[in-house]
Image (tube, helix red, strand yellow):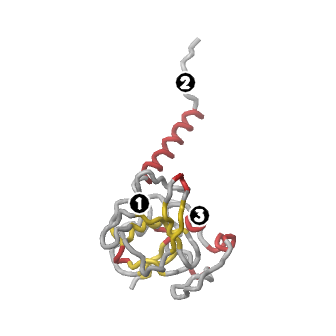
Amino acid sequence: MDTSNHSTPKSLLNILSLLLIGGTILASCANTPGEPVQNSTASADNSSEGYDHSKNPYWSITDTAKLNVPKSEWKKILPPDLYHIAFEGGTQRPFAGEYTDYKGTGTFVCAVCGHPLYDATTEFHSGTGWPSFYQPLTPTSVGHRNDGSLGMERMEIICPRCGAHLGHVFDDGPAPTGLRYCMNSLSLDLMKK
């Protein structure tokens, strides 16, 4: 009787799944050592980048009034991948975004509500696979809150108008600030000048 352990198709699928998950986590570590991509299910085709805002009654690049919109309402308005990142704390896969290394002028705004966030000239090549900026448009253009998810302490960046999750800030950026605002490309829309 042969007592050797042969892999069944089911166990082979389990091994392949673990390798795929491990590869996704390793790829995401380019962001910051030890920082895996959380909830990395945003689509690779970036279908919400450049989505039509005409069906979003809260969209404005001039209105600064804080919004108090229930998540259930946002879920009806936003594309699923943008909703996932903005209100479920998801993270876009690295090197999948339209704005990863944008070179040009304009203002990056919140893709959820249109609130101005960053001047495009403050974006820099970080090599992480996510758009990175060394400073927001103004000191109040972005909000900050502590993020203790994934067993580590980080500073989450949110839109101060709608509360959408945008990314995180790290202290390994270039001069003059030494900061790296690491954003999800799907969380941004570019208003070209």
Quadrant position of residue 42 = bottom right
Q: Earlier in the sequence, mark 3 or mark 2?
A: 2
Disc 1 target residue? 95
- Report the amino acid beneath label 3: His
Q: Is residue 63 left or right of residue 170?
A: right
Disc 2 target residue? 6
Report the front residue among 20 and 37: 37
**Quadrant where the N terminus lies?**
top right
Report the front residue among 43 and 75: 75
Q: Are marks 3 and 2 in contact (CB under 8 Å)?
A: no
Q: Is residue 176 left or right of residue 14?
A: left
Q: Secondary structure at mark 3?
A: helix
- Give neighbour class at mark 1: few <14, some 14-19, many 20+ (Cα, 10 Å): some
Which circle, 3 or 2, is nearer the viewer?
3
Report the front residue among 182 and 101: 182
Q: Position of residue 83 (x, y in %)?
A: 59, 67
Q: Earlier in the sequence, mark 1 or mark 2?
A: 2
Quote the CA–CA distance across marks 3 and 1. Answer: 18 Å
Quote the CA–CA distance across marks 3 and 2. Answer: 40 Å
- Report the amino acid beneath label 1: Phe
Disc 3 target residue? 84
Quote the CA–CA distance across marks 1 and 2. Answer: 38 Å
